[in-house]
Image: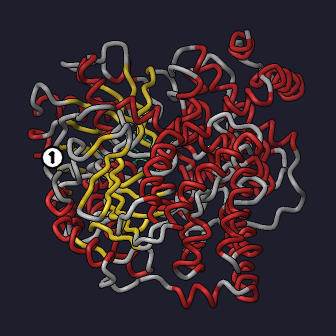
Amino acid sequence: MQSARQFLGPAPLTSTQGERGTHWIRHEDGDRLWFVLDKQGVSTNTLDEPVLSELRDLLDEVEQGEWKALVFRSAKPSDFAAGADLKQFVGIDTASAVRAKIDEANAVIDRIAALKIPTVAAIHGTCVGGGLELALACDWIVAREDASVGFPEVLVGLHPGLGGTARLTHRISPIEAMKLMLTGRTLKAAKACKLGIVDAVVPERDIANAVNAAITGRLARRGGGRVASAMNLLPARTAAAVQMRGETEKQAPKEHYPSPHALIDLWVRHGGSEEDMLKAERASFAALLPTETAQNLVRTFFLRERLKANGKGASGIGHVHVVGAGTMGAEIGAWCALRGLRVTIEDPNRAALGKAMAEAHKLFGRRLDDPERLRAKDRFVPDTHGNGVRHADLVIEAGPERPDLKRQIYARIEAEVRPDTILATNTSSLDLDALKQGLARPGRFVGIHFFNPVSRLELVEVVRHRTTDADVYETALRFVADIGRLPLPVKASPGFLVNRALMPYLGEALLMIDEGVQRERIDAAAEKFGMPMGPVELADQVGLDICLAVADSLGRDLDRPMPDVPQWLRDKVANGELGRKTRKGLYDYGSDGKPEKDKVRQAPDDAMRDRLILPMLDAMAAALDEDVVADADSADAAMIFGTGFAPFRGGPIHYARKRGFADISATLEALATELGPRFSPSGWWRKAED
Ligand code: NAD
C-alpha cells in the first residue's frame, strides 16, 4: 500500500487508491489511518445516514486498534463536504421523527471527538455545515488555501445540528462564532485561520507536512480558547444576546424565521458548558426541522437547483456586447465581466457609459480581490463606436423600451454581427414576435430578461418566441447559468411571468393610495406577509416610468382587466418624479437612498394582505393556464428568485396550495364582487385542484 505522503499529490486524493468502502476510502500510513470521504455516485460530498453509518463501522477499528493518529480528507476535487444531504430533511413533520436520527448521527461525530489519539481534518474547497462539524470534532483542522468554511444552516431555517454550535462557540470567540452561524456566511481559509477556526492554511504540496506537524504537536494552536471561555460566561452571554436579538429581529423576524432566534436562545441558556450545549442543540434542531419555515426554505433550496438545471452545460459564449448603458445595460455588462466574460458596452450617451464604468468598478471592488479585480476591469470595455458587435458571440440589447428604437438598433447590429451571433433583448414588456419583424435571422433572436438589481436578483427569464432556433434557446439558457444566474424558460407573452404577476400587486397598491390608505400601511401589509419590501417602495425602486410602461402594455395586451393607473401617477412620471432614481416618487428619498417613511398609523389587516397578494397569485395561475411557464414549482422559484417573494412561504403557488386553492378562488370571487372583475379567479385553480 502507498504511504499517505506519496498519495497526497497536487490534486485531492483520487478514488482509485486505498481500500474502498461504499463512501469512504481507508488508507493505512504506517501507524496512522486516513479516512477519505468519496460519496458514491455524486460530485459533491454530503453527509447522510449511509455515509455516517459506514464511518461508524470504520471507527470501531480506530477505537480498538493501536493506531497513533486519524486523518480525514476528501477525494472530491471541489469540496471536503457540503454539509448534510438536504433530501433527508424533506417532509419531516414531527420533532420525534427526527430526534432518533439526530442522536444517532451525533453519536458518530462524538466518537471522533472522544478519540484519545490525535485527529486531523485536512480540508479543501467547500467545507460547510455537517462537513465543518465533522472537522470541528477533530483536534486539528488543516486547510488548503482554497478552502472555505461556514454554517449556512440558518438559510434553510435551521442551525447546526451535529455539535457545530457547541464546538465552534467553544473553539473561537463565541461572538464571532455566533455571527458566522447567524449570517450563514462562508469564510475563506485565511480569515477562518485568523479567527481560529482552522489551525493552518497551506498549499496542497504542504498538506502532508502540516498534518504531520499537527499529529506530532508541532503546529501552533489557533483557537481562541481564552476569549471563548470568558465570553461564554453567563453575564457576557446575556449582554451580547441583547444586541444579537435586536439585529436578528431586524433581518429575520422571529415570527417568520425562528431558527436564528433559537440559536441565540441555545447559546444564552447552554453556552456555559460545551457538553450541555451539545445536548440542547439536538433538541433545538429537532424542533426546528419540522417547522413550516424550515420545510419551505429546504424546498426553496431545491427550487434553485431546479432552475440551475435548466442551463446545464457550457454555453461557449466568451464575448458579450451590450447595447445601452442605462440602469440595466450597465448592470448586465458589469455582471458578465465579473463572471469572467469579455464585455464591450455602447451607448450614444457618453455620461451613461462613464457612469456604467464607475458602477462596475464599485461592484468589482465589493466582490473581487486583486488581481481578479483588475482583470475584471480589463474585461469590461466602453465601446463608443460599437465596434465590439463584430466580435461578439452574444449581443444583449438594453436600450429604451421603444419598439421603433429597438428595431433600428437591430437593423444596424444584424448588418455587422457574425451570422452565428445571438441577438437578445432585455425588454420587460414588448412583444418579441412583433420585435422580430424585419430581422434577417429571427431564429437567432431571443429574450434574456434580467431583473433589477442583477447582482441581487438571481432569476433571468429566457424568452422564446414562436421561431427561436432550438440551439439558440439552449445556448441562451446555458449562458445565464454560466454567469451564475438562474434561467427560467418562458414563452413570449405580455409581461412574461414575473412582471405579469407583479403588476397587479403594484397596481392594487396604487389604487389603495388613491383611496387614501397610508402608503406605509400598505407596505407594512406586504412586509408582514413576508415580502422583502412593500409594493409602494418596490414601485419606486423599479422606477415609476418603467412601472407605467409595463402596466400600460399589460393593460393593452392581456385579455384580463388590470387595475386602472391613477392619473396622478402619470402626472408624477411626466414631472420626472420617477422614484428612487430621482429621489422623489411615491416616497421622498434621503441622500442614503432610503425612503423617508412615517410611522404606520394603523396596523394592516388580513383583508389588505389578500387584496395585494391574491391578484399576484391569480396572475401566476393564468400564466400557468397559458403554458407561459412549465409548471407550478418553476413559477414559485421564479417569484422567489426574481422578486424576493417570501421564501419561507415556499413560493406563491405553494402558499396557495397550503391555504387551499378553493379558499383562494373563493376569496378572489368575494373581492371581485366587492372591488371589480379584475379579481375574477382564473380557471386554473379549479383545474389544478382536480
Ligand atoms: P434606461 O433608460 O436606464 O437605459 C437605456 C439606455 O439606452 C440609455 O443609457 C440610453 O442612452 C441608451 N440608448 C438610447 N438610444 C440608444 C441607441 N440607439 N443605442 C444604444 N443605446 C441607446 O433604461 P433601462 O431601465 O436600463 O431599461 C433598458 C431595457 O431593459 C428596457 O427594454 C427595459 O424594459 C428593460 N428592463 C428594465 C428593468 C428595470 O428595472 N429598469 C428591468 C428589466 C428589464
**What type is the residue that disc 1 sits on?**
Gly
Vertical side of 662 occupied by 206: above or below: below
Residue 422, located in which quarter of the rendered image?
top left
Name the secondary structure under disc 1: loop
Vertical side of 462 occupied by 644: above or below: below
Q: Where is residue 423 in the image (x, y as percent from the top left)?
A: 24, 31
Q: In this view, does 643 lie to the left or right of 383?
A: right
Instruction: Indicate if the residue with disc 1 has its beta carbon within 8 Å of ligand 1.
Output: yes
Which of the pair 469/541 is nearer the observer?
Answer: 469
Q: Where is residue 109 in the image (x, y as percent from the top left)?
A: 53, 58
Vertical side of 97 occupied by 105: above or below: below
Which of the pair 261/580 is nearer the observer?
Answer: 261
Vertical side of 230 occupied by 401: above or below: above
Q: Quadrant of ligand 1?
A: top left
Which of the pair 538/213 is nearer the observer?
Answer: 213
Residue designated by label 1: 386
Judging from the image, the colouring scheme is secondary structure
Number of marks in the rendered image: 1
Res 578 seen here: no
Q: In this view, does 546 lie to the left or right of 512?
A: left
Q: Residue at x 77, y 43 (%)?
A: 96
Which of the pair 28/425 is nearer the observer?
Answer: 28
Q: Where is residue 325 in the image (x, y as percent from the top left)?
A: 31, 52
At label 1, counting other C-alpha atoms closer than 10 Å, the crowd grade (few under 14, some 14-19, many 20 or more) is: some
Q: Residue at x 30, y 55 (%)?
A: 334
Picture quarter with the C terminus: top right
Residue 434, located in which quarter of the rendered image?
top left
Res 282 seen here: yes
Q: Where is residue 363 in the image (x, y as percent from the top left)?
A: 35, 64
Q: Residue at x 73, y 14 (%)?
A: 689
Q: Which residue is drawn at 58% across and 38% down?
A: 88
